Amino acid sequence: MISQVFILSSQGDHLIYKDFRGEAGKDSINMFYEMVTSLSGAQPPVVMRNKNLNFIHVRHSGLYWVVSTKDNPSPFTIIEFLNRLAALTKDYCGSLSEKSVRMNFALIYELLDEMVDYGYIQTTSTDILKNFIQTEAVTSKPFSLFDLSNVGLFGAETQQSKVAPSAAASRPIVASHGEQGGKNEIFVDVVERLSVVIGSNGVLMKADVEGEIRVKCYLPTCSEMRIGLNEEFSIGKSQLRGYGAAVRVDECSFHQAVKLDEFDTYRILKVCPSQGEQTLMQYQLSDELPCAPPFRLFPTVEKDYGSRYSNDMWLIFIGRIVAINVSVTVPVPKGSLSLSQELSSPEQSAELQPRSKAVLWTIPRFPGGAQLSAVFKVEVPRLSSASLLEVGPISMSFELPKYTCTGLQVRFLRLSPTQPGLSQRWVRYVTHSDSYTIRI
Amino acid sequence: ETNKLYCTSVKCCIFELKAELNSDKKEKKKEAVKKVIASMTVGKDVSALFPDVVNCMQTDNLELKKLVYLYLMNYAKSQPDMAIMAVNTFVKDCEDPNPLIRALAVRTMGCIRVDKITEYLCEPLRKCLKDEDPYVRKTAAVCVAKLHDINAQLVEDQGFLDTLKDLISDSNPMVVANAVAALSEISESHPNCNLLDLNPQSINKLLTALNECTEWGQIFILDCLANYTPRDDRESQSICERVTPRLSHANSAVVLSAVKVLMKFMEMLPKDLDYYGTLLKKLAPPLVTLLSAEPELQYVALRNINLIVQKRPEILKHEMKVFFVKYNDPIYVKLEKLDIMIRLASQANIAQVLAELKEYATEVDVDFVRKAVRAIGRCAIKVEQSAERCVSTLLDLIQTKVNYVVQEAIVVIKDIFRKYPNKYESVIATLCENLDSLDEPEARAAMIWIVGEYAERIDNADELLESFLEGFHDESTQVTTQQNTQVLHKHTQNTPDSDNPDLRDRGYIYWRLLSTDPVAAKEVVLAEKPLISEETDLIEPTLLEELICHIGSLASVYHKPPNAFVEGSRGVQHKRLPARTASGESAESPDAGQSVGGVSDAPPAVIPSQGDLLGDLLNLDLAPPSASVPVVPASMQMGVDLLGGGLDSLIAVGLAGGTGGMPAGLGGTPAMGGGLGDLFDLGGGVGMATGSYVPPKAVWLPAMKAKGLEISGTFARRGGGIHMDLSLTNNAMSIMTDFAIQFNRNSFGLAPAGPLQVLTPLAQNQTIDVSLPLNTNGPIMKMEPLNNLQVAVKNNIDVFYFSCQYPISLLFVEDGKMDRQVFLATWKDIPSENETQYQIKDFHLNSDAASTKLQGSNVFTVAKRTVDAQDLLYQSIKLTNGIWALAELRIQSITPNYMTRLRTRASLSLSASLWVQFAMLYDCGFLEGLDHFVVFP
């Protein structure tokens, strides 16, 4: 059972403090903050214990979302709850930041009171909560693009700005009475995270995709939404549907509100979306990507002369789309002193980061089908052939907007009853790297 | 302007706020209360405003009312008298036509922990429990739990518990869920009365509600189901079938609660059942899915998977790849994944695993790299076929010359050498090249071990060791001990054909150095190298079982039972996996040892988790010996040969040479039976008061056999020393003088520490009591029975011989308390085929009494655990000759009969006779059950 819930700023300021069971003192907040700031890197921060109090926390938007408890509850329950609390706060306040939490503390207290009673979680569904919540959200105006809280898939994310109006998805779900009713919009995002390991011989060793369909709904009333996926979409190794390239995943799980009666035959998800953000479907695919991994990298490492070695990189992006925010991290031996580089275009950059023992090569925009090359010459005192062994696996991170690795597409998005003309529907796709590793 | 809410100055605020709170304008009041609450949040004391805030309570504005209630909950306790002012409004609000207000009132009242208020709460609560609106009912259900916490008696007297039970059949699943949650909590403080009354009917109701309630309600219900024990496998299967759909829920907490139910109920399913296999297959995907969550959940999931893999490795045996680390995993996730990878490593996937581990060894994070290198070594030890590849991988890593990689690699190579002796010594040359770079004690110790062990294959071994010796005084104990051992080792290996006087001298020097700490010396040289075992950090089976019952809870993250971190009554109940009670099949208790084995057929044993090198090698306590511990001058005099083989075989020669059969007439010997039997039997016996048990004096030498000299005596352990207490009586017609005593060689080397002090002549019919101090430095020879002592007493008349038996507890030394880690490790290291079973009946001491009693005789309780009304005492005993004995005693308060399992790794003959000794000790009523009795040199 939850004993206390509190939200702290990254500096440890008390933003929200709610005691549900009266079994722990208020000094627990400072106790927590001291513990969490004095952790060493290897200590798992998720669950901590001090005297008789256990702290479970997550971080969102730089804030600490903490539950303290005296007995033996499920940490899964509590982490899910805290994530949901953060999501609801975002839904209700429009954005998530120290400022928005400060401004809306009364609203958050009201939410907490309805979400938890005596440490038992009651509900986290906006549909139920909207019947109880009286306080209106206070938003800060004007809306700033640089507000860090907007970093996330929804809203003013740079690569998304062409797809959806910026800031559209980061306003409170419940329009305040003073304002014009917000636009009746619904956003459906298909987000995939790609993990790839390519062996030193260029062979694909492991490829996983984790994906989800997320919905953010601003429609005050919507009886049903139908999301049609590719008809050839199949689940499990054995099942194959239709001809041509299969859109296949290994595992699939759905939000409990999703009705699946038309899923088996027509691949239609039916759901009455609640206001706010929710994940309708999650899926995984391992090892059998329908397409080749998007990036190939051919590195060579050679000893130059003296204490210098040279690292030639040849990076190819296979695909017809544009990749953005591409970065390549190349480990360097301990004690590397300096880096000289040859890059193929001016907007790229490369930098030696001695603390993380790596060269970071960044490519802001990478058009499909292009090939880039780079030569890094690194100065290492007392360079030996053994120290070249330290040039370990290269990792990459990138974003591929308007692209899904599995090929999952939303064929249609229908609302019923048909909404009056004002409603807008947005479907967005993005694939980003989770862990993309190329071994040398 | 909202930042003004977080005003810094308190005093001016309070004054202003007071005015605003009493304003006529509703909006202004509301803003004022908000400000008050903001101040409250940041920790300012605004309790002075209590009356003003309570005045705002009577309002029809729900938002304002909620804010006021929020304030009340916080401050009512510090202002109980004023809180009474609010009672009327509460009672009125409980009658409000708006269900939101009714629920709000009853919820808030329950949170005001003031005794006076609770009296007023009963009536409104009774109404709200039967309210027409489910929202009010579900709030009232929780309120019963709140009230119970404040005043349990009141709740029982008012009959709220029955109303709560009725709510389990409510039409609204939210109400059911809250009623279940409230009852579960209340029943934790009443473990005996079956409040939840789980029976097939109520279980059916819960399973129906499970499909309808919110995700959070599902968790309450699943956790409640997990406490139920189905009657047979059929019921178990049907519950499993209805719970399985929860595995695909998007909320990981629901999934884990379902996994817990399934893991528990699976225990009851016969393994040959088709459904059992289906269930196993269904458990893997949801666990794998958890690993794609955010790092916090991943970490918690991995801790749970770690338990599941130990219990049922077959579930995830094909899922190795999901545990491969990603470069952007946080370090704590990486370390957990590595742990699970080693547990899942098998011949089938070893190549893949090794390739991964090798990559990890070049990562940036030092902790992770070290663990990866260690993991390679563990693979070699676990999967024999891979050993060669592991060794070559490790050699590659040593080539990198990265300091910590090299040191870690040497430490694991030493383990590999121990597991596969004389197989990979070709790599020693490479290792020796890296001597200079070793600066960590563990790595240095490992290297010294290798050099010493393979001295005859290393040309310049003596030079190498010498180089280590230069820094002798600066080294840590770990290295020093290792050096001593290995110098001796090498020395003994070389002695027969060594003509290097320098080396021999050096050996002598260190031998002398060692002999200033003779106990350590003896133990160092005697310490048999325990076989290196396959698995690390395995959780003890009974604990594992309990943790499996707590899957998805904090206990599963800490890997500790709840009673280790939850105070008070909550969580103290021990949970156990249900035994399989199939219809028409005899009940079979789940064999923990078997189920842990899993992938490898042999039950894996454990080596100490931390600093395993030192623990393995020496297995001893290097603490300064207490003054009472006997020394070993005898063996010193025997010369150099004893240093190695001599001492090593000392015990073996002395003790292991017997026939192994039961000594004839053992039980029939009066001294034996009586002496041992009474050891712990005499509840308030004389011996108990001062410590160790002293048997009553028995006549050892009757006068008629000794020309009028009668000797009776007993043995006692006092102040850390052994004493033989004798009464000499002269029944002869003449005075006796010139007494002297001698012992024959005996099993434990007992010998008089001084002459028999009979200073005055013994007159006719006179009796004299003499106490003869003994030591254990005498020559050793195995006796039958083991504790037999042959004594010769001489006086002016003649020499007389008699034999007597001493209680084995005489030899239990005071420093016999073993370190917990070492205990656990050693315990697991004993193969199960060496196990003997033993049953003891009719015992009436509780565990604490037994523990105290035994402590008096130097039987030390290392740890105590309580599982299912059974007390488990883990005890260690150390004999004067360095033999350790470990015991697990199961003491149950209900039935007086117990099964006892005895284990030993010592040679069978040794164990057989020792067993008889120990078993007799325990049998004669001094302990209820004796489980796992372990002896090893």
Image (tube, grey):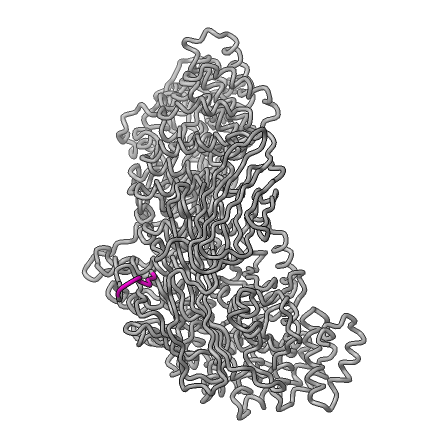
Q: Considering only vertical position in the picture, is A353 above or below B265? A: above
Residue sitting at 45 percent across and 66 percent down? A429
Question: Which one is in front, B508 or A292?
Answer: A292
> For residue B599, what is the image quadrant?
top left
Q: Say whether residue B870 is visible.
A: no
Question: Percent from the top left, x then y, of residue A5?
Answer: 58, 68
Question: Percent from the top left, x then y, of residue A322?
Answer: 48, 59
Question: Percent from the top left, x then y, of residue A368?
Answer: 46, 57
The residue lying furthest to the left in this view is B584
Question: Which one is in front, B459 or B221?
Answer: B459
Question: Percent from the top left, x then y, of residue A142?
Answer: 66, 75
Quarter placement of the C terminus of chain B: top left
Residue A247 belongs to magenta span: yes
Which stretch is magenta? A243-249
Residue sitting at 21 percent across and 62 percent down? B583
Question: Which one is in front, B514 or B279?
Answer: B279
Residue sitting at 50 percent across and 15 percent down? B462
Q: Considering only vertical position in the picture, is B560 above or below B103? A: above
Quarter placement of the N terminus of chain B: bottom right
Residue B387 relative to residue B503: left or right: left
The residue lying furthest to the bottom in this view is B97
Q: Say whether residue B745 is visible.
A: yes
> For residue A239, what is the image quadrant?
bottom left
Residue B867 relative to residue A362: left or right: left
